Image (spheres, rainbow, N blue to C red):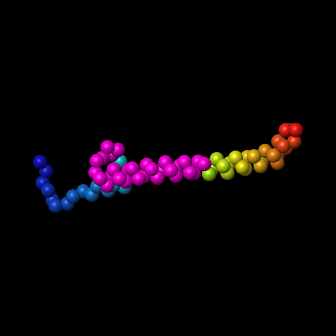
Amino acid sequence: MGVLTGERQQHRYQACRDDDCQRFACRVYREGYEAGYGAGAAAGYAQGQAAGYEAGHADGYAAGAASQDG
């Protein structure tokens, strides 16, 4: 058994990498991070896809794709 020196090692929830850590702060932080990451990724993908489609569509017509349709 070790000798206690009065110092405790801090457990920072932001740096916790244990996916099964049951400390309240770690669970709440992990859930919030996952929800925020998922929502941000979905929003970013939708915006990027819309911008890319508009740019690609405009470039295609500028390159003569409209004249091939009819």
Residue 19 part of the magenta-drawn span: yes
Q: Is residue 15 visible?
A: no
Residue drawn where x is 30% and y is 47% of the image? 21
Farthest residue, direction front: 70
- Quadrant where the C terminus sits is top right
Q: Position of residue 55 (x, y in %)?
A: 72, 50
Q: Position of residue 63 (x, y in %)?
A: 82, 45
**Across the whole image, how many numbered discs are drawn on residues?**
0
- Please tell me whether the stretch drawn in magenta is mainly helix, strand or loop: helix
Q: Position of residue 1 (x, y in %)?
A: 11, 48
Whether residue 55 sits left or right of residue 43 in the image: it is right
Whether residue 11 sits left or right of residue 43 in the image: it is left
Farthest residue, direction bottom: 6
Residue 30 or residue 7, whichever sits in front: 30
Residue 3 part of the magenta-drawn span: no
Q: Position of residue 14 (x, y in %)?
A: 37, 55
Residue drawn where x is 66% and y is 49% of the image? 50
Whether residue 56 sits left or right of residue 67 in the image: it is left
- Which of the 4 quarters of the picture holds residue 5? bottom left
Residue drawn where x is 84% and y is 43% of the image? 66
Q: Which residues are magenta?
A: 18-46
Residue 30 or residue 69, whichever sits in front: 69
Residue drawn where x is 31% and y is 55% of the image? 25
Q: Is residue 24 visible?
A: yes
Whether residue 5 sits left or right of residue 22 in the image: it is left
